[in-house]
Amino acid sequence: MKQPTGLLIAISLWAAAPLMGQPAASNLPRTADGKPDLNGVWQALNTAAWDLEDHTGALHAAPGQSVIEGGEIPYRPEALKQKQQNFAARERLDLSEAVCYQPGVPRAMYMPYPFEIIQTPKLIAMNFEFAHARRNIITAGTPHPDGFPDFWMGDSRGRWEGNTLVVDVTNLDERTWLDHAGNYHSDALHVVERYTPIDPTHIQYEATLEDPKVFTRPWKISMLLYKILEKNARILEYECVYYLQDEKYGNAKPVGVSK
Amino acid sequence: MMIQRYLIAAAALVAAAIPCAAHHSFAAEFDVNQPVTLRGTINHMEWVNPHTWIYVDVKNSDGTVTTWHFEMGPPNALLRMGWRKDSVMPGTAVEITGYRAKDGDAIANAKTVKLPDGRELFSGGSAPGSGGTVDVPGPNGKKE
Amino acid sequence: MRITITVALAFAAAVIAAQGQEPQWTPPRTPDGHPDMQGAWARRGTAINEAKAPSSPLGEFNTTGQPYPTIFNSGVVTTLDRAALASRKTGVVDPPDQVLPWRPEADAARREFMTHMIPPASLKYVEKAARCILPGPVEGDDRSPFFILQRPGEFVLAYEYNHVTRVFHTDGSPHVGKKIRLFMGDSIGRWEGDTLVVDTTNYNDKTSLGRTIPFHSEDLHTVERFSMVSPNLIDYQLTIEDPKLFTRPIRVAAYFMAAQQGTEPMEFACIEGSQTLPNVFGIPFAPAR
């Protein structure tokens, strides 16, 4: 026979769950395989893509508060110098802004453009409006492959822990930045993300970044992702590659062409 | 089963003949009238899309060394075949044929890349160390 | 026992004939009752093989010469797949003689355009497929796999090539407004029985339909039909209509064949590694680091 006190404790913990900040499991839409349904178009509503840390407004640059737990990125001293050099040359060195390269992880999650989550049991695809970037988050239980090259959007392996999608990201190309302010990483970057829906239209997004070549310790960012609820919302195209090619080469002459 | 293997081979042959949406032409960038054949050692490889790049140090007749850049196909197929970043180490001797870039630099589009043991990159053969032939592939989880 | 390919094919044909009327194969289904076409696929047969086309210098130097492995291409392994593939036509099937119904002025314009492509006289004459931009409805590198994902309200075709993602909205929502022009168009899907019919409009005029059709107009309209005909084969019919190019629609017959078991999507970044425009113009795309 079950211990009545155990049962009472279990009931009181369950009842207290919403007060502890856990999602009320009953109101989350679920997919056919029983997982929280993250399908839809989402977007972050902050200026983290501009600068993850606290930043004052400037012309054409909105102010924002830090999304970092603890406020600042814990750079190694020599890495902080590199960040400062990056900042000074950011118009040239920020490859996403300068030449429309894919923004990497986690930056793609807070670019000021919507993205769509397409969730199936073994593969969760994320389709970003910016540069039609895409993440393929493999939830089939397979590991990161050994000896693969780096990818601009990394290699992502996801699994569910209760209502939280946990995504482990490796193989991130060192040329991506974390924001436009020159915050950067090395090829040793390892990101662990947690996507926890707190209600049907808000996901609590957290990412822990670990890179011993650049940072003195792992550090974490946290923000909400908001579901786009407008009717007929869909990802359009921000094909900045095409626009930039027009700008750079539109009036240029091919080499070796004399006419 | 023997019959099945041959039938699969036949199906693969049929598939190969079918026109499919291709990658882009190289005629705009590379000059089919400037074929090159070079022997050198691998400086490094860049496993990037849309083209893997192989950098080859070639000794010129005057003793200087030029690092040629050779463009190859996308790396994803090599990776799926079992090749890995360290499959081809710097310093490996290589014989490489291709077509030079129109702008005249030491850049070319690679046609064949032969390793000292006779293997060719992108040859459709087996990955290094595997020793065997490519497995007869199976269905994508879909049964009859 | 050695069997030649010819004898083996004859044997297979005999087996299939001997089986007589087979029960109609039906595909597995998603929880919302539609055929489950999810997985990794190889697309085949979409190239527009126009008869009597002007010769394209693009085709003369078509390849690195490297035989590209079809490692992800499973071949078909069930008798149903073999039967489905056996007498399959691909490429242009309407018109049956592949002579495309050009409007004379459009035909003249594309012929003239093609004379400036190799070498390209300017950016506009650089082959679109070489620029790492979104490829439009026909193009895209078929040496890389395609992934189909389905969820209620959407059917998604995710190309590995250049991370193109086409979302077909099957939730009844309408097309976007006419002023929105898209490289990949805007796609609405509906199920006709077990066939997914995809209607795509709102194309821009910045893509190419192939080596002999270097441009099209914003009036381009495509209808695609996806039906799973055997465990490892999706029949794919593509109808292309552009009243500024052709006097009537044309149709291309193609298919998707299942990829090798365990094929996972891999990133195929394009512009980040592309040297095409820098090579053509001698001007780097990315700033020096």
Image (tube, rainbow, N blue to C red):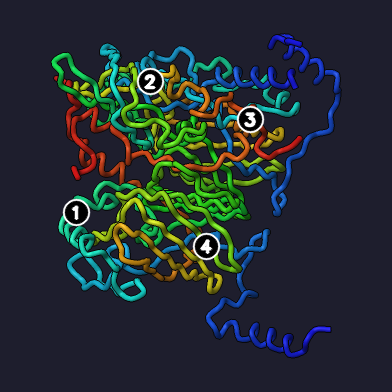
What residue sits right under mark 4 in the picture?
A166
CA distance separating discs 2 and 3:
26 Å
Q: Which residue is mark 1?
A: A91
Chain for disc number 2: B
Disc 3 marks a residue whose amino acid type is: Pro
Mark in front: 2 vs 4: 2
Residue A131, position as x, y percentages in the image: 36, 48
The residue drawn where x is 61% and y is 68% is A162
Pointer 1 and pointer 4 on the same chain? yes
Which residue is the site of mark 3?
A: B137
Q: Is residue B6 above or below residue A152?
A: above
Query: Is label 1 on the same chain as label 3?
Result: no
Residue C84, placed above or below residue A2: above
Q: Chain of mark 3?
A: B
For badge 1, the amino acid type reads: Glu
The residue that appears at 39% across and 17% down in the rendered structure is: C59
**Could you tell me which chain the residue with mark 1 belongs to?**
A
Q: Is residue C71 above or below residue A63?
A: above
Where does the N terminus of chain A fall, quadrant-wise?
A: bottom right
> What SS does tag 4 mark?
strand
Between the C-alphas of marks 1 and 3, the distance is 48 Å
**Looking at the image, do the residues carrying marks 4 and 3 touch, with CB atoms under 8 Å apart?**
no
Residue A205, position as x, y percentages in the image: 45, 67
